[in-house]
């Protein structure tokens, strides 16, 4: 089958060119990892899909009514070919924020990073005490 004067081939070509593929690459500056939020009997759980990233460079910040997950990585690379020298600096970063309901036990929030998935456990609370702002440690 041949296409003539159709937008379809150009759309496919544009999507699969290098710029289109870079939209899903964490090493590019415009990466936003996908998130699943599970509801369990014990509370909620956030699964952030971020393979190949280092857990030490994640930051989970708890505020009175929200939880934010961010990642920052700076990388520099130098290549020399003959008389040409090329240096590239790359900054990989993202930031996601989530509103927390009053039913979340903010003191019991925990996080793990395993097999490329950051899991943040948000347990339900039994009483309504006010939580302080803090940083969540990733195990």
Image: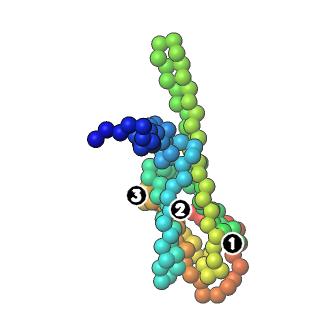
Alpha-carbon span between mark 3 and mark 1:
29 Å
Q: In this view, does 99 lie to the left or right of 22?
A: right
Mark 3 vs mark 1: give the one in front: 1
Residue drawn where x is 63% and y is 77% of the image = 101
Q: Where is residue 136 in the image (x, y as percent from the top left)?
A: 60, 65
Residue 65 tag number: 1
Q: Quadrant of residue 4?
A: top left
> What residue would you read off at disc 3?
115
Element carrying mark 1: loop
Alpha-carbon span between mark 2 and mark 3:
14 Å
Q: Quadrant of residue 87?
A: top right
Work out which residue is located at the far bottom of the displayed protein and give it: 127
Residue drawn where x is 58% and y is 33% of the image = 89
Q: How crowded is mark 3: few (under 14 residues within 10 Å), some or many (20 or more)?
A: few
Residue 41 tag number: none
Mark 1 vs mark 2: give the one in front: 1
Q: Are marks 3 and 1 in contact (CB under 8 Å)?
A: no
> What residue would you read off at disc 2?
138
Q: Is residue 42 above or below residue 30?
A: below
Mark 2 vs mark 3: give the one in front: 3
């Amino acid at each position: 089958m041949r296409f003539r004067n159709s937008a379809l081939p150009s759309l496919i070509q544009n999507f699969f060119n290098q710029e289109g593929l870079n939209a899903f690459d964490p090493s590019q500056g415009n990466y936003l990892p996908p998130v699943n939020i599970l509801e369990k009997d014990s509370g909620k759980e956030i699964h952030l899909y971020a393979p190949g990233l280092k857990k030490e460079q994640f930051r989970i910040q708890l505020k009175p009514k929200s939880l934010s997950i961010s990642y920052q990585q700076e990388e520099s690379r130098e290549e020399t070919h003959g008389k040409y020298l090329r240096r590239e600096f790359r900054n990989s970063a993202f930031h996601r924020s989530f509103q927390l309901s009053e039913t979340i036990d903010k003191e019991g929030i925990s996080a793990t990073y395993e097999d490329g998935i950051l899991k943040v456990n948000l347990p339900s609370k039994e009483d309504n005490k006010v939580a302080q702002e803090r940083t969540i440690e990733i195990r």
